[in-house]
Image (cartoon, rainbow, N blue to C red):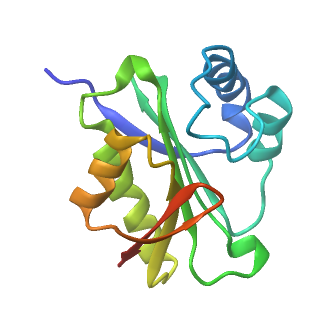
Amino acid sequence: MPNKIRYSRIDSSWIDKLAVFFERIHTGSEDKFFHPHPFNREKAKELGHHQGGDLYFVQTMEKEICGYGMLRGWDEGYQTPSLGIFIHSDHRGKGLGKNFMVFLHEQAKRKRAKKIRLKVYPENTDAIHLYQKLGYSFSKKEHGQLIGCFVL
């Protein structure tokens, strides 16, 4: 029987588990391609108490965090949110990234977003392949990263 995947919006109940997950990302140098903010306890606490329009989620299996995702930019006044996603290396290759992306797309639709944008390093070929398979198009580069767009 497959493990049940759950998605939870980050709130104060997730601070400790998220801090541990962030530490695993940072100490394992897995933040090479994904570094939207520091991966530390202070950031976990900040996200646990976030009250703005940006959305932050964890993806869990058996109560263990296997992924972290965000839709942000609304707090700064942008109409189009930027998507960020991270699946821990222990859980990659199981379709979790695709499932999480679909979940995040649905969350953006609920907030009436028309498009989503993301950035990805050209060397991160696995992520690029996933994004293209989901319908993202890449048309420009910014600060060494490809800029992708998805129309909802």
Q: Residue at x 36, y 23 (%)?
A: 91
Residue 123 place in picture, x, y as percent: 44, 41
Residue 41 place in picture, x, y as percent: 81, 27
Left or right: residue 19 compared with residue 148 = right
Farthest right residue in view:
42
Q: In front: 137, or 92? A: 137
Q: Residue at x 66, y 59 (%)?
A: 143
Farthest left residue in view:
1
Q: In which quadrant of the rendered image does the N terminus lie?
A: top left
Q: In front: 106, or 151? A: 151
Left or right: residue 37 compared with residue 10 = right
Left or right: residue 64 compared with residue 36 = left
Residue 19 place in picture, x, y as percent: 72, 25
Q: Residue at x 62, y 20 (%)?
A: 29
Q: Residue 124's quadrant in the figure?
A: top left
**Residue 34 visible in the current orientation:** yes
Residue 8 place in picture, x, y as percent: 51, 44
Q: Residue 151's quadrant in the figure?
A: bottom left
Q: In front: 149, or 12? A: 149
Left or right: residue 15 compared with residue 67 = right
Q: Is residue 148 above or below residue 126?
A: below
Tell me how many marks there are. Answer: 0
**Residue 62 visible in the current orientation:** no
Q: Is residue 152 above or below residue 28?
A: below
Q: Is residue 45 above or below residue 77?
A: above
Q: In which quadrant of the rendered image does the C terminus lie?
A: bottom left
Q: Residue at x 35, y 51 (%)?
A: 128
